[in-house]
Image (tube, helix red, strand yellow):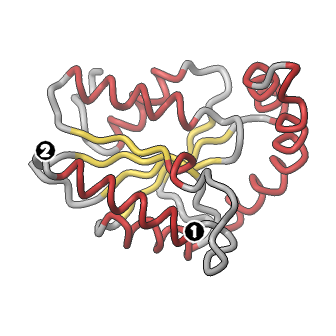
Amino acid sequence: MEASYGIFINGAYGVGKMTVLDHVGNLLAAVSRPFSLIDVDWFHRSSPVAAFDPQNQVIEARNIAAVWANYQTAGPRQLVMSGVIAELADKRRYSEAVALPLRSVRLTAEPSTVEERLRARYDVSRQAELRWHLDRWKQLNERLTDANLDEVVIATDGFGSASVASLIARHFGLVDASR
């Protein structure tokens, strides 16, 4: 069955988007529902950027479109993405790349939880990356809150990633409510 929309797991750094995305895939596999997962962060990680695309957004969208088109050759499926939608232009760009409307859920976490998760992610050799994310987390979180582009918000503090994934899958009717 072809999905009539894509699901986008939105949120600031350290809220658990990538891990939850993986768990959503596990839930869909467990009920034999065809799916494809896309973590948009990996579609703009190149340098130097093209002169015509200083934010790497055009290249990112083209990459996402190509991968989604390739996934679709395997048959109808539910698309689930993760990344950051901080403004309506972001949502439009991703929606156009996959030619589907996007329904987004935003994950949140308290600052102490985010800091703990980010510190666990970056070892001593990656302290500059850790500092960059810690310095920008609050501002990005505020932008996401102010943008109010998500149909549901889930606080991830105190919940395992599998539990958050289950909430998302049930919200979108992807699995039986008892899962």
Helix, strand or loop at mark 2 = loop
Amino acid type at mark 1: Gln
Amino acid type at mark 2: Ala
Above or below, 157 relative to 74: above
Residue at image coords 46%, 74%: 92
In the displayed structure image, the side of residue 173 where residue 141 appears, left or right: right
- Circles 1 and 2: CB atoms closer than 8 Å: no
Helix, strand or loop at mark 1 = helix
Q: Nearer the viewer, residue 119 or 126?
A: 126
Above or below, 16 relative to 173: above
Which image quadrant is residue 166 in? top left
Residue 111: image x %, image y %?
A: 83, 36
State the CA–CA distance, disc 1 to disc 2. 27 Å
Q: Nearer the viewer, residue 147 or 123?
A: 123
Q: Nearer the viewer, residue 30 or 37?
A: 37
Q: Nearer the viewer, residue 8 or 96?
A: 96
Residue 120: image x %, image y %?
A: 76, 19
The residue carrying mark 2 is 74
Which image quadrant is residue 145 in? bottom right
In the displayed structure image, the side of residue 118 where residue 154 appears, left or right: left
The residue carrying mark 1 is 57
Q: Earlier in the sequence, mark 1 or mark 2?
A: 1
Residue 126: image x %, image y %?
A: 83, 29
Residue 160: image x %, image y %?
A: 55, 18
Residue at image coords 31%, 45%: 172
